[in-house]
Image (cartoon, coloured by chain):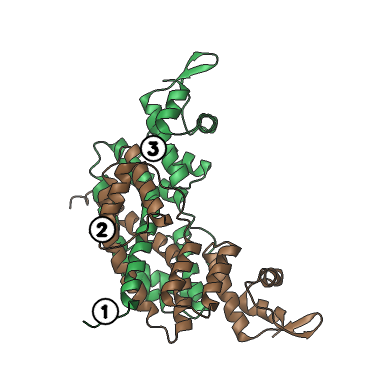
Chain colours: A brown, B green
Amino acid sequence: MRVAELSNRSGVPVPTIKYYLREGLLPAGERTSPNQARYSEEHLHRLRLVRALVEVGGLSISAARDVLGALDDPDKSLYKAMGTVEKAVVALDGEPSSDEVAHEWVREFVTRHGWELEEDSGVYATLVNVLTTARQVGQDTFVDVLDDYARACVDISERDLDWVMTAPSQDAALEMVAVGTVLGDAALAAVRRLARRHAAQRRTAPPPPCP
Amino acid sequence: MRVAELSNRSGVPVPTIKYYLREGLLPAGERTSPNQARYSEEHLHRLRLVRALVEVGGLSISAARDVLGALDDPDKSLYKAMGTVEKAVVALDGEPSSDEVAHEWVREFVTRHGWELEEDSGVYATLVNVLTTARQVGQDTFVDVLDDYARACVDISERDLDWVMTAPSQDAALEMVAVGTVLGDAALAAVRRLARRHAAQRRTAPPPPCP
């Protein structure tokens, strides 16, 4: 198909498609003349994937390029792709604070759940900084909430992986990891707001009127 | 205390403190001379709160101002503050797509869990757009994952509220809502990565060597 049809079917404007082509997010079409190229169903699929990552997931062009690179990697594996996607998706980074109590809490938390976590990772720094900040504003007990997050996240993760395992091929599974992480973050934030609002409403609702 | 001591005790540089003062995130100190002001323990506490929202939570100055406004509102309530905080914190917005299947899925999802959701809200638009995108990249089954997210989010929300209820006063409870939402988002993202990585590692680990 021509670029105009690619645009029609994907809903992505032609200038944006050209931009993605220039940025290497979309492979070049097959040249049919100096000014024209032909695109396949695969291009359409890849373009929709780019849209999911960039427009719905809010990824930067370079982060999206990293994620797509993981899908195209000849040595790809589920675990490796997951690492790349996570690095690209979450802005969990920065230097951990020097609050030793927070460091100790994070180490205990990780051990308590039987996990492993490198202390030079963004996830480690994020947890240390969250707990440091909670302590500074006098909310030391926030650390207890983490254990409940952990239990909920184990459930979510198992379910996410069960879903990925339904993929018909490894390529499809890797795409599910990429899309699932990006869309999953947005969906989880939305669902959490919804659940919390409902719970708060229920707790603070006035008693029903007397009959 | 002078601004220098406020800076020392909070770890926030003096120029940043002056910026927060100009932006109205921090109330002015008590003038002691044309060039000097005195700050109280309350200023220090408020400054730490600003830091939590802006530096750890990644809120914009205007979003942080909205959240602090909710804490200072004379008509404040837990439920109202929660709404303001959520609006400021999550970038869940945009127009929902015109994909009728996705709209129907979201309506069914919300009803199935006994929730309520205005169709002109950012949460609704986010869910519709996530499902539209999933459909476009051929991952229609992603909708099933949402039910598991819902169950996990109900647990998390109840626990979050239990934690807020431990507050010694309503003012403290509102601060816990603000800090808990902002830090909670960061913490939940980090914990989820950790749990998922562990689950993936376990599933793809080679079998243990023969004895």
Residue at horizontal 48 percent and vertical 46 percent from the top = B59
The correct choice, above or below, for B32 with respect to B115 in the image is above
- Location of residue A170 with respect to A190 vertically, above or below: below
Quarter of the figure with residue A20 = bottom right
How packed mark 1 is, by other alpha carbons closer than 10 Å (few <14, some 14-19, many 20 or more), is: few
User: Which residue is nearer to you in this view: B14 or A52?
Assistant: B14
The quarter of the picture where residue B167 lies is top left
- Depicted A201 relative to depicted A78: above or below: above
The quadrant the N terminus of chain B occupies is: top left
Q: Residue at x 35, y 43 (%)?
A: A132
Q: Which residue is mark 3?
A: B71
Give the residue at x 51% y 33%: B20
- For the residues marked 1 and 3, what is the alpha-carbon distance in whole angstroms? 55 Å
Could you tell me the amino acid type at mark 2? Thr
Residue at numbered disc 2: A111
Place of residue B95 in the rendered image (x, y in percent of width and height, measured from the top left):
54, 62
Give A175 or A123, whichever is nearer the viewer. A123
Q: Are marks 3 and 2 on the same chain?
A: no
State the image coordinates of residue B197 (x, y, percent, origin top left). 36, 67
Task: Indicate left or right for A70 with B45 as reference.
Answer: right
Residue holding disc 1: B208
Secondary structure beneath label 1: loop
Marked residue chain, label 1: B
Identify the secondary structure beneath mark 3: helix
* Residue B145 visible: yes
Q: What is the x, y in percent for residue B196?
A: 35, 67
